[in-house]
Image (tube, rainbow, N blue to C red):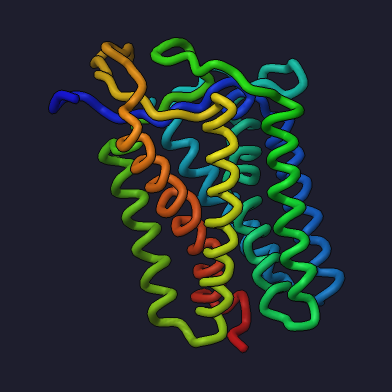
Amino acid sequence: MVLLESIFMIRGGYLGEDFSYKLTSSIVAIVLVIFDKKRNKRLDYFWVFLFGTLIWAGIEALLQLSGTRVMPDRMLYGIELPLWISIPIQGIAEGSYLAVLGIFIADLVLNENTKKYGIIFLIVIIAISFIRVFIIYGIETPNIGGDVASRRNIFGIGAVILVGGMCGLAVYWLATTKPEPRRRGLYMFLFMLIISSFWIIFNVLAGQKWVEIGVENPDGTYSNLRRAPLLIEIAVLAYDIFFEIALIYVPFLAIPYMLGLIKEE
């Protein structure tokens, strides 16, 4: 690896371009928001959903419009989606969906009366992920250095600033908030970490996600792309799971608390 080379996170096949599963994830998130409102007479999940969607849709818009993430195709049941539709779907499916799942399981587990249901729900989500990846979509051979559904420079300056800022906010809130919200936030983080770990591992094994090293040329093309050495790939995937997924989503809960939209108990 030479000094001018970059590290790229790759999404292959369905993981990048197929929006049907993203739509399904979005619907699940909305159902949980409605459940929380009806069952608990509150808007906690709604605020997590709203801030998660707005923030992540904004992030995706910046990534794609700046060329940091390259996604040539965005398909929903064979229909090519325009950016103004695909971005909000990504905001939900790749942002608020996991956050709402995390807080839902956290709330179940934190309540002794529903703890077992939280564990069962977690296992079901992981099982569904396994079925979706290996049975519905199947295993593919990674197209190393070729045309892929999504290629992102994981350590681009903008990405590092964004991740640092969001994760910094998460750590600050967890360190300064009251014990009950902190406990809720930590459990949310833990379950997001568990779910995303299985999700990433499944997709790596299925050839849907991997890490490349190469040169990004000024004209937007790439040179000398190749799969990253195993240790680098493991380290980058671990960074992705811990910082770019689990920790970076904690502010979706923290911000509503900080604004007083979710009451501290």
Judge by depth and name the residue closer to the eye, 177 or 209: 209
Look at the image and tell me in which quarter the C terminus lies: bottom right
- Residue 89, placed above or below residue 189: above
- Residue 198, placed above or below residue 120: above
Left or right position of 33 against 233: right
Return the x and y of residue 44 as percentages of the image width and height.
68, 70
- Residue 17, placed above or below residue 244: above
Return the x and y of residue 156 as percentages of the image width and height.
29, 36
Left or right position of 18 against 73: right
Residue 264 found in image quarter:
bottom right
Left or right position of 245 against 99: left
Return the x and y of residue 140 as percentages of the image width and height.
59, 18
Look at the image and tell me in which quarter the N terminus lies: top left
Return the x and y of residue 75 as percentages of the image width and height.
67, 21
Note whether residue 66 is visible: no
How many marks can you see? Answer: 0
